Amino acid sequence: MAYLNSLEKSKMYLDSVLELFNRTSLTAALNTASQQYDWMGADELKVLMIKTNGLGDYQKDVGYPQGAIEATWETLKLATDRGVKFLLDRVDNDEVLALTMGRVAEDFTKFRMVPELDAYRFSKYANGAGKKEEHQTLNYENILQTIDGARVYMNSLDVPTDGRFLFVNQNLEGAISNALKRYWGNDAVINTEVKSYNGMQIVYVPNSRFQSMIQLNSGENNEWGYKIPDESLDINFMLMYPKSVVQAAKVNNGKFISADEPATMVDSNIFLFRIYHDAFVIDPLKNGVYVSVKPKAAP
């Protein structure tokens, strides 16, 4: 059989990670819908901000009134640089190695990387939101009224209604489902999941990823990923116009080093993975992010 070289193995592993990330991340839907940007080197972005004036009167003797375009480039610097090194036991069969790498990619991406990046982004959006309100108890009796209040608030500020996302704490999924009256016929299959509300796509988020604050662990002392600090507040829901935010990630080319190469110094295959990423609320557009948080219960 034909054996894969280190470059091919690196690409195979990296492709698996990125494909799984885009398929399972709850914030991945914002990648194309959010504010667009251009890269400036490895860790900086340029975001083009455009502002125009409104209409004026057309006059037959003068013609069109002179308008103005204000175009500015905002530079954003990515603050998060994360990485990991995995040791894979030496195997002589490429099929076995591919299977092992595939399982490693699945566990790492679905259970480690995706939750961390989603939690990081939601915490950044929560802290940059144009409006943050506290709602101690949301249930089927008041949750739709509260969400409608967020919609009315955004509408009053002329935030566009098209393409809005409604991210909801998974703990409140039952409240939304019970709040909407539906009548069933003789359907063979009944699905009570509510996927949209008044034109807004609903995305349910596990509570562990839906926090006002997170702390990234360094990997030292075997502490990996992220943790939720005591002062963090659970997010009830987040209403978002996606053009109000920017999220960016640049993956350093994953590097596979075969156990046969002297540079490894160990009898294992090595895979290195590194990612720059960050998330921002654009300040002039921050009214497009509304967050409801649950305050801490009084002692």
Image: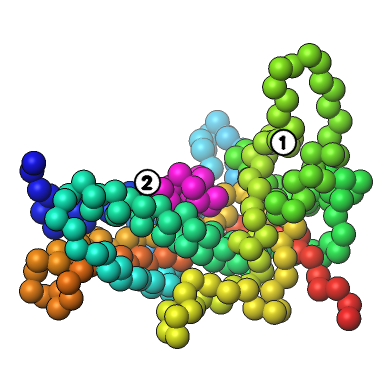
Q: Quadrant of the N terminus?
A: top left
Q: Residue at x 10, y 54 (%)?
A: 5
Q: Residues within 10 Å of mark 1 (few under 14, many from 20)?
A: some
Q: Residue at x 86, y 31 (%)?
A: 181
Asked if marks 1 and 2 touch (Cβ < 8 Å), the reply is no
Q: CA distance from mark 1 to mark 2?
A: 26 Å
**Can residue 16 be spotted in the picture?**
yes
Q: Is residue 15 magenta?
A: no
Residue 49 drawn at (x, y percent)? 48, 56
Residues 168 and 187: in front is 187
| Above or below for 262 versus 125 | below
| Above or below for 175 versus 273 | above
Identify residue type, mark 2.
Glu
Q: How is the image coloured?
A: rainbow
List the single residue furthest toward the top. 186
Q: Residue at x 84, y 39 (%)?
A: 178
* Residue matched to label 2: 19
* Residue matched to label 1: 194
Q: Quadrant of residue 229?
A: bottom right
Q: Which residues are magenta?
A: 17-35
Q: Is residue 29 magenta?
A: yes
Residues 90 and 230: in front is 90
Residue 96 drawn at (x, y percent)? 23, 50
Q: Quadrant of residue 86?
A: bottom left
